[in-house]
Image (cartoon, rainbow, N blue to C red):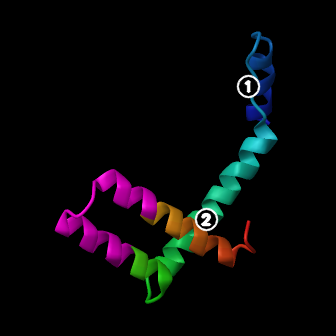
Amino acid sequence: MASENRAKTLAAVEGQSIKAADNAAIAETARQDLELYDRLSKGRGPIDDILKNSAKRLASGDAKRADIEKKALEQVRAETSKYRGGQ
């Protein structure tokens, strides 16, 4: 309720708006994704393989850290989406 009131207050300022319900849905999805990632990264499997491979690439210096992180994030997102019904 408080976030709805804040959203209304900000809406009074021209060009500003907050969609509290949308933000709550996004936050819940992020929480679920983090929980899924935590579960999948703690055991053997594709996420663990992605993390180990990325760590090896970082240690060997064969690419820029940002590039390794970007690729790992893309791979993790692709893998976790399989468990969320491909969203």
Find residue 7 and report its horizontal and vertical position in percent: 76, 26
Answer left or right for 76 relative to 32: left
* Residue at disc 1, secondary structure: helix
Find residue 45 and report its horizontal and vertical position in percent: 47, 87
Predominant SS of the magenta segment: helix
Answer left or right for 30 relative to 74: right
Point 18% across, 69% down: residue: 60
Answer left or right for 56 relative to 14: left
Find residue 87 and report its horizontal and vertical position in percent: 74, 65
Which of discs 2 and 1 lies nearer the camera? The answer is 2
Question: For the residue marked with disc 2, what is the amino acid?
Answer: Asp
Q: Which residue is mark 1?
A: 6
Say above or below: 37 vs 2. Answer: below
Point 38% across, 73% down: residue: 51
Q: Nearer the viewer, residue 5 or 24?
A: 24
Question: For the residue marked with disc 1, what is the amino acid?
Answer: Arg
Q: Nearer the viewer, residue 5 or 61?
A: 61
**Magenta stretch, residue numbers:** 51-71
